[in-house]
């Protein structure tokens, strides 16, 4: 073996030994720190007992005082020295032993050797402690200083029993950019869930203000929990005003990272009134309406937020408009899926047929107002009156939620009532991929938005401050609050105009499996309809052996009833189709042939 190999082997052994030694000393320091925290109260109690005994027996003639002194000595012996003091005593003892048993060596050498060894060991201990100290450079505020002091193991030990927290003990608290983090050891029957239920007792023990957000979750190993006091935010000092250069949803208050939500996801945005849903959604709406291959559709019956975006988005603000636009979207979705090339899973957005983001603002209102919308039909009743039918937008929205992603038509649902059946339809809730939850009123609402395991994993949306703080659960993020960016109404109004999406564009020529679209303008009555739905209905009428009923056309063409009704109206108005006396449909070509 060469000298280089020998030297490399020695270095590996030395490194392994150094790591083992450091780990051993660190564990020993933790053990001694824990024992001191547990046993120093016993020393204090023994001193109080001795003081009482001295007051009763100043001369020391009874066994009471002697027993108290003996108990104090025993309690002191049971409290281990700090590691630095233990190491210094050991080094000095070794030096004295060497001086006694090796008298032939000059005393001066042994004295200075002992001092050098003790200094080296003490320096090593201090260096280890300094390495473990918080080196973030953060200066605690007056509130944080008080909390850090009360989180010390000694203070916790002295007051835990009074607050019903006996069997728990804190570790060393740390101040971070997101607040104070402290590990809590759990003994006996204590669990993280049980400790979370005792949050009021912890708040009382620490003297923390009621509005201070507190998180309690399972620790990194069994028998431990992690207590987090959100005294500060990593977003503090950042400019959270939205600009085209700062297009993220917001800033992570724990890590300080920019949080973005990519297009192509089905979103649920929930929060109680005043929590800031509209402000939180504006950066996302901008992304959904920006670019040649993106289009935005907003369903807003309150007419407040939708009006801000009507210069760059298709807006439906009445129940009838909601039904109409949902019919168009469903027809567009089915048509895209029908011409999707074989082997391709998702539609590729183009400027002619872009990605469409459908935003339902205040879903509870849409579920109520757009459920039964009266429509007049072309047929008449026996007494000569126009037949009225009720139509609903919900089936179309549910269809978009289930199948729209493959057609690049994504549904975003916003509501103040995040409960299944009241604010979120049962068919839409399971399709949600990303949940953005601002402050809600109850833990039950938080579980509906963020999942049944929300509270157990720290997703406590009912504890969020109002407004402008959200939790974003996408399967990747931790339950860290996000401070959302502020996008003013004036900024939205000043955005450049965009041509809103509409089904007035229809395919004319297909190339390489993708249709090329053209804008339909002022179609003359004698010209064939160029709308794809009307063309499909016309073809179905022409190929039928006899006049067909309107309700059968939906089955033949695969279109929705609303789309068929609009197509029939277009064809009859344009003179391409006529109704027979019994209400059936036929083409004018058939009438011309019969007349000839």
Image: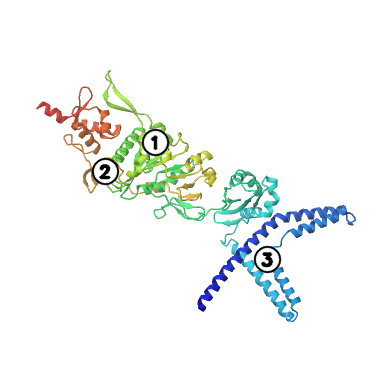
Query: Which residue carries the number 3 mark?
Result: 84
Seen at 42% across and 37% down, the residue is 363
- Viewer-side residue, 207 vs 73: 73
Q: Position of residue 113 (x, y in %)?
A: 69, 76
Q: Residues within 10 Å of mark 2 (few under 14, many from 20)?
A: few
Q: Specify which label sits upstream in the sequence, 3 or 2.
A: 3
Q: Is residue 441 left or right of residue 365?
A: right
CA gap, disc 3 to disc 2? Answer: 76 Å
Q: Mark number for residue 584? A: none
Residue 521 lies in quadrant? top left
- Viewer-side residue, 504 vs 332: 332
Quarter of the figure with the C terminus: top left
Seen at 40% across and 47% down, the residue is 284
- Regarding residue 312, the answer to whether it shows in the image is no
Seen at 53% across and 73% down, the residue is 9
Residue 153 lies in quadrant? bottom right
Q: Position of residue 106 (x, y in %)?
A: 73, 81
Question: Looking at the picture, does residue 529 appear above or below residue 154?
Answer: above
Query: Which residue carries the number 2 mark?
Result: 339
Mark 1 or mark 2, which is nearer to you? Answer: 2
Query: Which residue carries the number 1 mark?
Result: 301
Seen at 69% across and 51% down, the residue is 157
Q: Specify which label sits upstream in the sequence, 1 or 2.
A: 1
């Amino acid at each position: 073996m060469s000298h280089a190999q020998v030297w490399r082997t020695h270095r590996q052994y030395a490194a392994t030994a150094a790591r083992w030694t450091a780990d051993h000393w660190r564990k020993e320091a933790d053990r001694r720190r824990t024992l001191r925290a547990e046993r120093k109260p016993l020393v204090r109690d023994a001193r109080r007992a001795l003081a009482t005994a001295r007051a009763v027996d100043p001369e020391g003639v009874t066994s009471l005082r002697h027993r108290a002194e003996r108990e104090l000595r025993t309690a002191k012996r049971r409290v281990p020295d700090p590691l630095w003091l233990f190491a210094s005593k050991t080094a000095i003892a070794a030096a004295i032993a060497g001086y006694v048993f090796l008298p032939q060596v000059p005393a001066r050498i042994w004295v200075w050797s002992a001092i050098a060894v003790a200094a080296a060991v003490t320096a090593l201990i201090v260096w280890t402690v300094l390495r473990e100290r918080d080196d973030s450079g953060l200066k605690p505020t007056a509130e944080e200083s008080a909390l850090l002091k009360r989180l010390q193991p000694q203070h916790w030990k002295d007051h835990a029993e009074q607050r019903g927290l006996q069997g728990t003990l804190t570790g060393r608290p740390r101040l971070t950019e997101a607040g104070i983090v402290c590990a809590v050891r759990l003994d006996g029957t204590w669990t993280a869930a049980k400790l979370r239920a005792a949050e009021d007792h912890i708040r009382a023990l620490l003297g923390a203000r009621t509005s201070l957000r507190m998180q309690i979750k399972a620790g990194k190993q069994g028998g431990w929990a992690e207590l987090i006091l959100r005294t500060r935010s990593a977003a503090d000092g950042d400019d959270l005003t939205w600009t085209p250069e700062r297009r993220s949803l917001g800033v992570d208050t724990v890590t300080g990272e920019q949080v973005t939500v990519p297009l192509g996801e089905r979103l649920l945005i929930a929060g109680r009134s005043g929590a800031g849903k509209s402000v939180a959604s504006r950066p996302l709406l901008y992304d959904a309406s920006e670019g040649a291959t993106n289009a935005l559709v907003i369903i807003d019956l309150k007419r407040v937020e939708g009006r801000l975006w009507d210069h760059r988005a298709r807006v439906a603000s009445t129940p009838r408009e909601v039904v109409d636009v949902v019919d168009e979207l469903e027809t567009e979705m089915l048509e895209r899926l029908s011409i999707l090339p074989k082997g391709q899973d998702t539609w590729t957005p183009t400027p002619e047929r872009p990605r469409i983001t459908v935003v339902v603002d205040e879903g509870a209102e849409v579920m109520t107002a757009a459920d039964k919308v009266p429509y007049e039909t072309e047929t008449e009743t026996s007494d000569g009156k126009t037949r009225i039918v009720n139509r609903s937008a919900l089936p179309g929205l549910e269809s978009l939620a289930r199948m729209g992603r493959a057609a690049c038509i994504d549904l975003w649902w916003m509501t103040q009532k995040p409960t299944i059946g009241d604010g979120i339809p049962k068919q839409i809730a399971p399709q949600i991929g990303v949940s953005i939850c601002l402050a809600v009123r109850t833990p039950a609402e938080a579980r509906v938005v963020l999942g049944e395991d929300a509270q157990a994993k720290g997703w406590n949306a009912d504890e969020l401050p109002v407004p402008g703080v959200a939790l974003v659960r996408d399967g990747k993020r931790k339950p860290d609050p996000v401070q959302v960016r502020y996008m003013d109404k004036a900024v939205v109004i000043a955005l450049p105009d965009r041509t809103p999406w509409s089904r007035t564009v229809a395919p004319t020529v297909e190339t390489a499996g993708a249709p090329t679209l053209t804008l339909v303008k002022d179609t003359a009555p004698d010209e064939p309809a160029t709308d794809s739905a009307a063309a499909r209905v016309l073809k179905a009428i022409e190929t039928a052996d006899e006049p067909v009923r309107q309700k059968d056309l939906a089955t033949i063409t695969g279109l929705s009833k609303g789309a068929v009704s609009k197509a029939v109206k277009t064809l009859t108005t344009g003179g391409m189709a006529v109704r027979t006396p019994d209400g059936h449909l036929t083409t004018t070509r058939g009438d011309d042939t019969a007349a000839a």
